[in-house]
Amino acid sequence: MEPVELEEAVRNWLRREQRKPYREFAFRGAEHDWELVGTLLCQCPFQASFVWRCRIEWYRTELSEREFGHLRVIEGPPDESWRVLSPDGTIRGAAERIRDDGLTGVCEGIDVEYIRRRARGFGEGEPATEQLTLFRRPDAETPSVADGNHYATAKALHMLDGGTYVSQSAYLAVGTAGGNDAGTETGDPDRPAR
């Protein structure tokens, strides 16, 4: 792992967001850190909430196949979205459910068809080189995917279908002990401590 500045990680995240067809925002890439964080929180208030909830240190890292296989889906309420799609809370678990249950269309608000198309694309030579954004709480061993859940699930689905693992780079936000982590007193990351 290599330490990086917040600006580098957030710029990467915003570049990924800017490529999404439903996102429309101005982003030059030369903004100050506070402008970058403000833009990120406007575009991804739920996904990026850890940026203001915790003291974090940022790293650039390469995930081994084992580490990739243990990635957890984005944090959130247990009975919603990705946590329902993935029985065990992992990216691999989401891919297994898509494959094993023959899921298509949209499931729990997640575009399963897009995931299937991406997985097929990897099989047809599309490079699997996007950088994920991960978050790991101070008390956790395994990070969750803050940005890139569809991409990571497609990559896992491709691997389940016999595809080869291609090294995965990521920006990892690590919550530091003693940080201002909302929810630590309540035990619920979605209900801040008072």
Image (cartoon, rainbow, N blue to C red):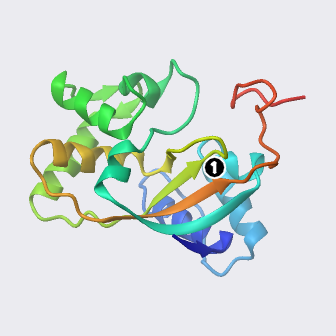
Say left or right for 164 vs 14: left
Q: Residue at x 17, y 48 (%)?
A: 158
For the C terminus, give its image quadrant: top right
Name the residue nearer the viewer: 194 or 40: 194
Q: As drawn, which residue projects farthest toward the top?
A: 79
Q: Say what secondary structure mark 1 lies in.
A: loop
- x, y percent for residue 181: 77, 42
Count every numbered label the image shows and give the total: 1
Q: Is residue 162 above or below residue 168?
A: above
Q: Is residue 57 visible?
A: yes
Say left or right for 151 vs 11: left
Q: Is residue 2 above or below residue 51?
A: below
Q: Residue at x 33, y 59 (%)?
A: 64
Name the residue nearer the viewer: 110 or 169: 169
Name the residue nearer the viewer: 31 or 177: 177
Q: Residue at x 70, y 77 (%)?
A: 31
- x, y percent for residue 101: 19, 21
Circle 1: residue type:
Ala
Say left or right for 187 vs 123: right
Q: Is residue 102 visible?
A: no
Q: As drawn, which residue projects farthest toward the right?
A: 194
The residue to which callout 1 is attached is 48
Residue count near mark 1 (Cα–Cα under 10 Å), binned few <14, some 14–19, many ≥20: many
- x, y percent for residue 118: 23, 51
